[in-house]
Amino acid sequence: MDALDMKTRHGELCPLDTTLKILDGKWKSIILCRLMEQELRYSELLKTLPGCTRRMLSLQLSQLEQDQIIAKEIDVSFIPIKTSYHLTDLGKSLVPLIKSMDQWGEMYIKTIQDTTSSEII
């Protein structure tokens, strides 16, 4: 099921489910963070994701490409063929949302850690 199919998962229009589906995946958020900085080749991306298998990276990239968040560029003038990925305009429009979610996550972690620390004392 692709992200667009999620828009009516609850029997009503729910754009939030569509957004969550796009970001859902163990490696998607970090892939998007890497591609926010620069276009990367497949092998470069893989090196920045310790623990991610080639199969999993290919699957996550394929899903992001299907959802039109990233684009795959193939340059046959290189040997071996150069395959690289970059954010599409839709993907770039996610950047402020991803940054806001990151900031919220930092605040949440700090708040929970502070609460947990004060309960232990």
Image: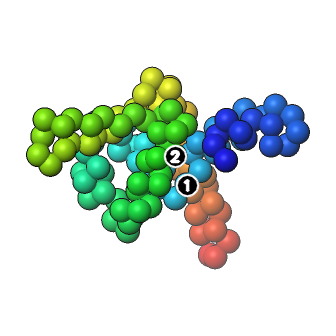
In the displayed orientation, state which residue is furthest to the right: 11
Q: What is the crowding at mark 1: few (fewer than 14 residues within 10 Å), some, or many (at least 20)?
A: some
Q: Is residue 42 above or below residue 88?
A: below
In the displayed orientation, state which residue is furthest to the front: 76
Q: Is residue 36 above or below residue 41?
A: above
Q: Is residue 9 above or below residue 91?
A: below
Q: Position of residue 70 (x, y in %)?
A: 43, 35
Mark pair 1, 2: CA separation: 9 Å
Q: Could you say which disc has been placed on residue 25 in the image?
A: 1
Q: Position of residue 72 (x, y in %)?
A: 35, 37
Residue 49's image quarter?
Answer: bottom left
Q: Amino acid at mark 1?
A: Gly
Q: What is the crowding at mark 2: few (fewer than 14 residues within 10 Å), some, or many (at least 20)?
A: many
Q: Quarter of the image containing the C terminus?
A: bottom right
Which residue is rendered at x = 67% and y = 47% of the image?
1
Which residue is rendered at x = 50% and y = 32% of the image?
68
Left or right: 60 in relation to 76 = right
Q: Secondary structure at mark 1?
A: loop
Of the pair 4 and 113, the residue shown nearer to us: 4
Q: How many marks?
A: 2
For marks 1 and 2 on the same chain, the one whose residue lies earlier in the sequence: 1
Left or right: 84 in relation to 27 = left
| Nearest-to-viewer mark from 1 and 2 | 2
Residue bearing the label numbered 2 = 63
Residue 104's image quarter?
Answer: top right
Of the pair 121 and 3, the residue shown nearer to us: 3
Q: Position of residue 25 (x, y in %)?
A: 55, 54
Of the pair 77 and 91, the residue shown nearer to us: 77
Check whether the beta carbons of the residues at disc 1 and disc 2 lie within 8 A of each other: yes
